[in-house]
Image (tube, helix red, strand yellow):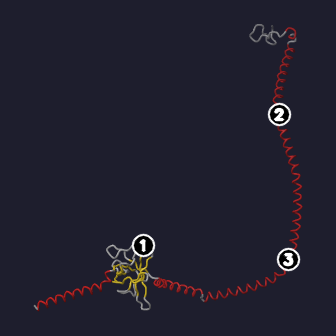
Amino acid sequence: MESRSNVIAAGIFVILFTAGLLLAALWLTSDRLDLVQYRVISDIPVTGLHPKAAVRLRGVDVGHVDTIAFDPHSSKGVLLTISVDRSAPITRGTYGQLAYQGVTGLSFIALEDDGSNPQPLAPDSAGAAPIQLRASVLEQITASSQELLKGAVLATTRINALLSTENVASLGATLRNTQAATEHIATLAAELRPAARSLQGVETDARKTFGQVDLLLGDLRGVSAELGKHLGAIDEVGRGAESVGAASRALQTALVGETLPRLSGAIDDLARTSRTFDRVLLDIDTQPRSLLFGRGPPPPGPGEPGFAAPGGSR
């Protein structure tokens, strides 16, 4: 009976101990139940970052770094795995930057959101998009400082070349020539002062001349006004000349188009009458009796009866 009670007590102890271990394990891992993993890809060095380093979203602790390894798909990339609180608003526009804690040199990942894509980002899984780790402002300044240093060295080299011994000597000669030219200009200005004073008298004479020109222009305006008054009479004379020209053209048209053709016809009729009168006189001269008995028959021609050749016998 006693042995059975010991067995029962031992069994109860084992059960309670196992339950305690389970509760302790749940208590120790309770914070991990609310965490999800994301991948972070970095093309820049992650100096000062180590596993268990903090992960903060807009300054609030939301997780920690789990692993740091080289990216098998990139020779310059670093692949990080971070665990983040499930309730943290991680979107496709979320990106990370390295931030440093005081003067310890240790760094953590600061998550920010640029608002480019508000869709939630799925936790790390096959095909899930990673979070990009971007260079911080300090890292950008550090990277650009090398370019600035190269530019400063180049500028220093050019300044040294510009301030060589030959250039300095040339600059000194230029300054001396400038000083000599300034002295010559001062001397020339002193010599030009009397001429400048004489120009004042020339200016006075010019003003008087301009006054006389104004008077002459006034007289010309009066002459122009008088000429304008007589322009009306000149226009009337011009219009009269145009009327005379029109009348002469009309007279020329009448003479050429009507009188001359009629005169030409009368001259032709007179010529025909003169030729007829000549023929009548000729007939009277050859046959005077025709005035009393009329014109006789014409004389026989060659081959006709009664024809007699001139100078032959009848």
Residue labelled with disc 2: 254
- Left or right: residue 37 versus residue 142 is left
Marks 1 and 2, how far apart at CA? 107 Å
- N-terminal of the pair, mark 3 or mark 2, is 3
Position above or below: 283 against 262:
above
Q: Residues within 10 Å of mark 1 (few under 14, many from 20)?
A: some
Seen at 40% across and 72% down, the residue is 119
Q: Quadrant of residue 76?
A: bottom left
Mark 3: amino acid: Gln
Q: Which residue is mark 3?
A: 200
- Residue at 28% of width from left, 84% of height from top? 26
- Residue found farthest to the left: 1
Point out the residue furthest to the front here: 1
Q: In the rendered structure, which amino acid carries the disc numbered 1?
A: Pro
- Quarter of the rendering occupied by the C terminus: top right
**Mark 2 residue element:** helix
Quadrant containing the N terminus in the rendered view? bottom left
Q: CA distance from mark 1 to mark 3?
A: 83 Å
What percent of the width, then of the height, locates residue 217?
A: 87, 63
Q: Secondary structure at mark 1?
A: loop
306 vs 136: above or below: above
Can you tell which of label 1 and label 3 is closer to the viewer?
A: 1
Label 3 or label 2, whichever lies nearer to me, is: 3
